[in-house]
Image (cartoon, grey):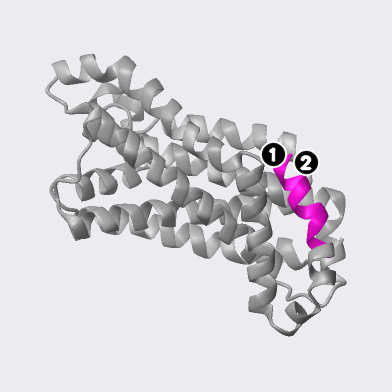
Amino acid sequence: MTAATTTSTAPALFEALPEARLSSFAQWRALTGRIVWTMATKGELIFAVVVPLVFTVGFYLPLRLVMNFQGVHYEQYVMPIIVLQTMSFTMMSNAQRAAFEALTGLSTRLQTMPIGLLVPLSARIAAGLVRSVVALAAALVFGYVIGFRFSAGFVQAVLFCLFSLAVGTALAIGADALGSLTKSPEALSQALTLPTLIFGMLSCGFVPEHSFPAWIRGFVRNQPISQFSFALRDMAADGVTWQVLWVPLVWVVGLTLAFVPLAVWASVRRS
């Protein structure tokens, strides 16, 4: 879809701009700009705004009365999982774009051109970050409408945003690697949807841990989505402490260290 338009014009872009060959940064800037422009003109950025709206309505409205009755301010409680689920759509977008480039042979063609080996990968990740910023801003606006507030101050609010984007970028890097290896946008989208749903629903993002059966609470509490939601919830409320932050931080750093080499290898390998 949008990836097709982006990738089909990328070689022509570099052929028309020979000066970009002199600098990897210029190449990255040109390719990133082309992807972002395509996302803007083909409606992907609009979709990035609609997704958090759907999540806000779909998650908040059905459960707010039940949770408020239990003494939980649900607008504060549910906002982290809305943001995390929104970031997961950036992950899927990166995966589909990488898969399309590999499927159509564009990745191989770019490797034969005077373009830095890591430029296509870094351009996709940068464009995905732009999409994440748009989606995060939309999610916070919709969260404000339902009553979500940053009561811990400006610094914690900035930390909330940075940590959310870090999680989204780490996931996008891993998804990009899978896309480059799988070469099937449709199959990859379906494959990523299932674990996203499982980890999302079996987390403390929607309901507290005690709402789950005792035999599964250990998994629910310790899996990364729950840990991310714990940290984000504290950042928005009273301010996160190192005791809460270090575990989700280890998850983000660990996922990044695992995904980056895989993504680099998948992007630069020759078919």
Q: Residues within 10 Å of mark 2 (few under 14, many from 20)?
A: some
Helix, strand or loop at disc 2? Answer: loop
Question: Which element is circle 1 on?
Answer: helix
| Rendering quarter of residue 265 | bottom right
Badge number at residue 188:
1
Q: Amino acid at mark 2?
A: Ser
Q: Is residue 23 above or below residue 155?
A: below
Residue annotated with mark 2: 184
- Using residue 72 as the reference point, say whether residue 247 is left or right of it: right
Cβ–Cβ under 8 Å for marks 2 and 1: yes
Residue drawn at 27 percent across, 31 percent down = 145
Q: For residue 261: magenta?
A: no
Residue 218 can be seen, yes or no: no
Name the main secondary structure of what is drawn in magenta: helix
Q: Position of residue 48 (x, y in %)?
A: 52, 39
**Which portion, as a residue range, is magenta?**
1-11
Q: Nearer the viewer, residue 138 or 17?
A: 17
159 or 267: nearer the viewer = 159
Quarter holding the C terminus is bottom right
Assess whether residue 4 is covered by the magenta stretch: yes
Foreground of the two, 25 or 197: 25
Q: Is residue 236 left or right of residue 184?
A: left
Q: Is residue 38 visible?
A: yes
What's the residue at 32%, 45% (across, down)?
A: 227
